[in-house]
Image (spheres, coloured by chain):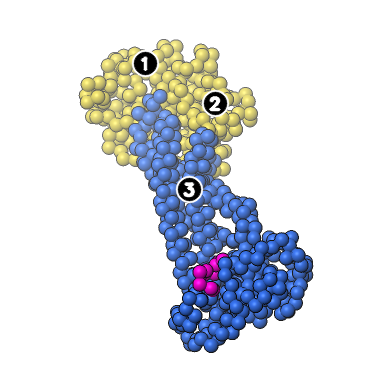
Chain colours: A blue, B yellow
Amino acid sequence: MSFTGLIIKNPFRNRTRAALAIVGIAIGIATIVVLGMVTGGLQSATTSTLKAGAAEITVTPIGSSGFESGGGTLNESLANDLLNVSGVANTAGILSASANVTGASTNSTSGSGFGGGRFTVNGIDSSKLSLEGIGSVNGTVYTNGSSNQLILGTTAAKSLNKTVGSNINLFGTNFTVTGIYQTGNFMTDGGAFMSLNTLQNLTSNDGKVSDIAVKVADNANVTTVSQAIQNNYPNQLTTTTAADQANRTNQALSSINTASTGISLLAIVIGGIGIINVMIMSVYERTREIGVLKAVGWRSSRILTMILGESIILTLTAAVVGIVVGVLGVEVILAVIGSSFTAELTVNILLRAIGIAFLVGLIGGLYPAYRASRLAPTEALRYE
Amino acid sequence: MNNQNNIIEIHNLKKSYDKGKIKALNGMDLEIKRGEFISIMGPSGSGKSTLLNMIGALDRADEGFIKVAGIDLMTAKDLNKFRSQEIGFVFQMHNLIPNLSVVENVEIPMYETKLSGKEMRERALELLELMNFSNLSDIINQNPTKLSGGERQRVAIARALVNHPSIVLADEPTGALDSKTGDTILNILKDLHQKENVTIVLVTHEPYVANMAERIFKMLDGKIVEEKKI
């Protein structure tokens, strides 16, 4: 058996203890992986909100704010009025409503999104889909005014098991899926879009929209335009820029990242102490064996390498377990709650998890390995 | 002092423990020729095991002269290499590693050589075949915990010899065995001594066992007090 084979085999001679040590460290690694995947997914969603071509400003009634606002409607005509504000290049009135696929509906006018089992349907002029970040569609876009066509986001299509040409019943009406779109934003991709008039009719919101997407002219400043809209419609409209939203999300992500770093440090400290404990126990139990290894001519450096290697093997095994548990955990939780959020597993997360595990093994194994390598052979051989 | 025929030369060797209160070796003198089979007897605390530890370079003496296989052990730096190349230990309690198989235990000393894994395996099997196992193919991949005491000690002897040592140091190798199994072990040691011309230093309490050697030394209070040729 090679020396490497010996190092791999040794940590598992006491399987219960090895398993407990692995579980302890794997929990820390799994937490790091889960937080990393969630942060990565949110980061991607945030990036997609700043996509070129999409509207930079969302206008909502005072009293509701942001992309995910709830309550309150605006007159559809305001979308045209806003074109008169300096710096506004394009606008689109959007009506959002929640429905379930079997046809039961609620007439809430919430923002776009798909989560917790609620399916969000948006009405918008098909020529203005680009303001929602929808550049291209697999299939065709619905015809404005059509009463039975819609397009589905990729996540929604996957969740509902629908493809182009499939039928779907919403608000008691059968629709044909004419196309599938993908924006990269998990909220947008978890919903559907149809003709504005159709959704207004189905939800008894004729002439009403939930919010207005505003595309700013190339030479205009988003903040200035946003302020101008609020100044022109005091006590009536409020605005949120995509950058504001992205900043808010980034601040939240920053907090998650800080938490992730804290957990990583905790994992190193707690895991390291656990590994020191396990390896010290192992060295104590094998004192006589280490004496024999010295008696047959093993160098102290070889004994140090063996114990250190065993420690690292334990933590790397924990890393593999932690990564698998973390990835499966995220997927299972998302599937159970029916969320369309896409968590991202990146090479960076994997390297971080493995790097931390390696570090824990190295730090935790260093003292026991040093201790083993310094054992006097005669004393080790006398050890009972 | 520098007889070329002597594989072990010890003069006025002293070793004490507990800040000088216990004098384990107290001016020890001993010369052993290459290829000899000698035994050392003496009561507990007479310094037998300390002497073996000094010859095997497991510990250093406080003062005196000790040269083994041409190496001055008072000044030599790389004692691991010396142990690996020149010494084979056989302990009373075999000291096999429980989670390794029989053949893997025999391979252990060869990690410090430049042999490949395949060469190590071949050498280990070669040694095990010399140990007169009737069921070798059945036990080579078993853990030593499943073997009898005599079988374990034979594996330990194979391990001691695997690096072609010039000296085998056996500390009460039959002490934990019944007389019949002990005889088998002694015969194996004697055969190896005759066939391989290995120098054997055997420590024992048993006069019967000591009589297997060519010379018997009796120790008392850290010194040789009697020498007898068989």
Q: Which mark is residue A28?
A: 3
Dot 2 amino acid type? Thr
Left or right: A309, with B26 as reference point: right
Of residue A246 and residue A230, the one placed in the foreground of this image is: A230
The residue tagged with tag 2: helix, strand or loop?
Answer: helix
Is B149 located above or below residue A294 in the figure?
Answer: above
The residue identified by callout 1 is B41
Q: Which residues are magenta?
A: A60-70
Residue A252 seen in the figure: yes
**Subunit ID for the residue under disc 1:** B
Placement of A263 over or under B84, stated as above or below: below
The answer to whether residue B35 of the structure is visible from this angle is: no
Distance between the alpha carbons at the discs numbered 1 and 3: 59 Å
Which residue appears at 26% of the width and 25% of the height? Answer: B17
Looking at the picture, how far across and down is residue B219, in whole percent? 31, 16
Q: Are marks 2 and 3 on the same chain?
A: no
x and y percent of residue B6 in the render?
34, 29
